[in-house]
Image: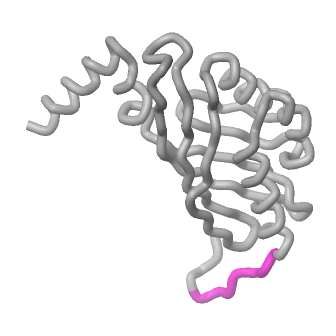
């Protein structure tokens, strides 16, 4: 990390890379997973509340699993901040559960920290979202327990 008084180097390819990546995510389909290596380094790390994997095939598997377990998954990026060779995206993830509440649209809010290499490829992808609030509380049995625990803890 640079000291606050040090000017941040300008990496124009990062802005272009972010625009390409946001477009890819907002239009993601199972067929698009085969192009993941045009956005991520071969040894890129992906971490979220449920996964911590390295490499394009493992990252593709995370998204393939998303498509097999959820209906109509899609990302909407609402904000982006780019600094040097990194970016921070704020997003909404829209989907429907296949097994529970299958007809009810769901939305999870979260954010992603990305680090790019010199070629503009993602080397690190870290998702931040509250699995307890955003997902577990939406599940039938677990959700009831989570909401009760949250109310009990706030008393």
Q: x%, y% of residue 117?
A: 84, 59
Magenta stretch containing residue 32, yes or no? no
Q: Give the range drawn in magenta.
A: 5-11
Query: Residue 52: horizontal and vertical position, in percent?
Result: 65, 32
Direction from residue 145 to residue 134 in the image, left or right: right
- Figure quadrant of residue 58: top right
Colouring mode (rainbow / by chain / secondary structure / one colour) = one colour
Residue in the picture at 77% in, 62% down = 19
Please say if 32 is above or below 6: above
In the displayed structure, 113 sits above or below 103; it is below
Q: With respect to residue 140, does 19 lie above or below?
A: below
| Residue at 56% from the left image edge and 51% from the top image edge | 91
| Residue 8 belongs to magenta span | yes
Residue at 76%, 67% in the rendered image: 85
Q: Residue at x 62, y 64 (%)?
A: 80
How would you classify the magenta stretch by its main secondary structure?
Answer: loop
Q: Where is residue 26 in the image (x, y as percent from the top left)?
A: 70, 47
User: Toward the viewer: 71 or 56?
Assistant: 71
- Determine the residue located farthest toward the front in the rendered image: 103
In this picture, residue 154 sits left or right of residue 69 = left
Q: In which quarter of the image is the C terminus?
A: top left
Q: Is residue 79 left or right of residue 36?
A: left
Residue 8 rendering spot, x and y as whole percentages: 70, 81
Q: How many marks?
A: 0
């Amino acid at each position: 990390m640079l000291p606050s008084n040090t000017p941040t180097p300008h990496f124009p390819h990062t802005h272009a890379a972010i625009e390409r990546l946001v477009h890819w995510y907002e239009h993601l389909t199972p067929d698009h997973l085969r192009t993941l290596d045009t956005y991520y380094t071969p040894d890129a790390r992906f971490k979220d509340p449920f996964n911590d994997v390295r490499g394009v095939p493992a990252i593709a598997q995370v998204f393939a699993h998303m498509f097999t377990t959820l209906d109509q998954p899609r990302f909407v990026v609402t904000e982006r901040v780019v600094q040097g060779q990194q970016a921070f995206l704020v997003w909404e993830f829209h989907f429907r559960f296949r097994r529970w509440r299958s007809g009810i649209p769901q939305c999870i809010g979260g954010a992603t920290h990305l680090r790019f290499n010199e070629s503009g490829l993602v080397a690190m992808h870290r998702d931040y979202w509250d699995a307890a609030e955003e997902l577990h509380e939406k599940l039938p049995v677990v959700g009831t327990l989570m909401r009760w625990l949250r109310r009990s803890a706030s008393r």
